[in-house]
Amino acid sequence: MHDTLDVPRTVSAKSRGVALALAAVLGPFGGHRFYVNKPGTGVLMALTLGGAGLWWLYDIILIAGGSFRDAEGRLVRRWDPEEAQHGEHGVIPSEILDELDGLRAQVAELAERVDFTERLLANPHREP
């Protein structure tokens, strides 16, 4: 099982939507394999017309299911081409940043409560 910090290194910068479109239109000729920088298997696929259609169908299923890999072995998972191009450059969505700010505020409030409780416990009221 992969840690969430490993996701950027294991997900390809290539778009699954583009790969699926290329597989659907140019699949028997290996168009999707050229797209993910696998020219060797792309040529082999073109020479066999997609392995008589079986290899082509297998690749379409892999791409649609998010299990297809690029030349570096990274999963081609992102549907949006823009997300695929910009997703690995440290851009954090605003929703995550907003959630992070909310968590920071909650932690700060909890820290204040712990400090207050510690002060109360350190100076107990004594009755005469």
Image: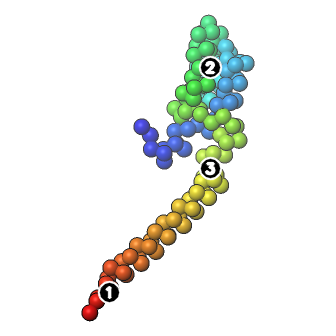
- The amino acid on which the numbered mark 1 sits, given as a three-letter code, is His
- The amino acid on which the numbered mark 3 sits, given as a three-letter code, is His
Q: Residue furthest top?
A: 52
Q: Residue furthest right?
A: 25
Q: Identify residue for label 1.
A: 125
Q: Is residue 35 visible to us here?
A: no
Give the residue drawn at x 59%, y 20%. Answer: 61
Tell me the number on the disc at residue 112.
none
Label 2 and label 3: CA atoms lie apart by 28 Å
Label 2 and label 1: CA atoms lie apart by 74 Å
Tell me the number on the disc at residue 89.
3
Depicted 96 relative to depicted 3: above or below? below
Give the residue drawn at x 69%, y 37%. Answer: 80
Image coordinates for residue 70, horizontal then vertical, percent: 57, 30
Q: Identify residue for label 2.
A: 60
- The local secondary structure at tag 1 comes to loop
Occupied quadrant, residue 117:
bottom left
Q: Is residue 26 left or right of residue 109?
A: right
Name the N-terminal-most of marks 2 and 3.
2
Depicted 43 relative to depicted 116: above or below? above
- The local secondary structure at tag 3 comes to loop
Q: Is residue 14 left or right of residue 25?
A: left
Give the residue drawn at x 57%, y 23%. Answer: 62
Tell me the quadrant of the picture where the N terminus can be found: top left
* Mark 2 Cα-neighbour bin, 10 Å: few <14, some 14–19, many ≥20: many
Q: Nearer the viewer, mark 3 or mark 1?
A: 1
Give the residue drawn at x 57%, y 26%. Answer: 65
Name the N-terminal-most of marks 2 and 1.
2
Q: Nearer the viewer, mark 2 or mark 3?
A: 2
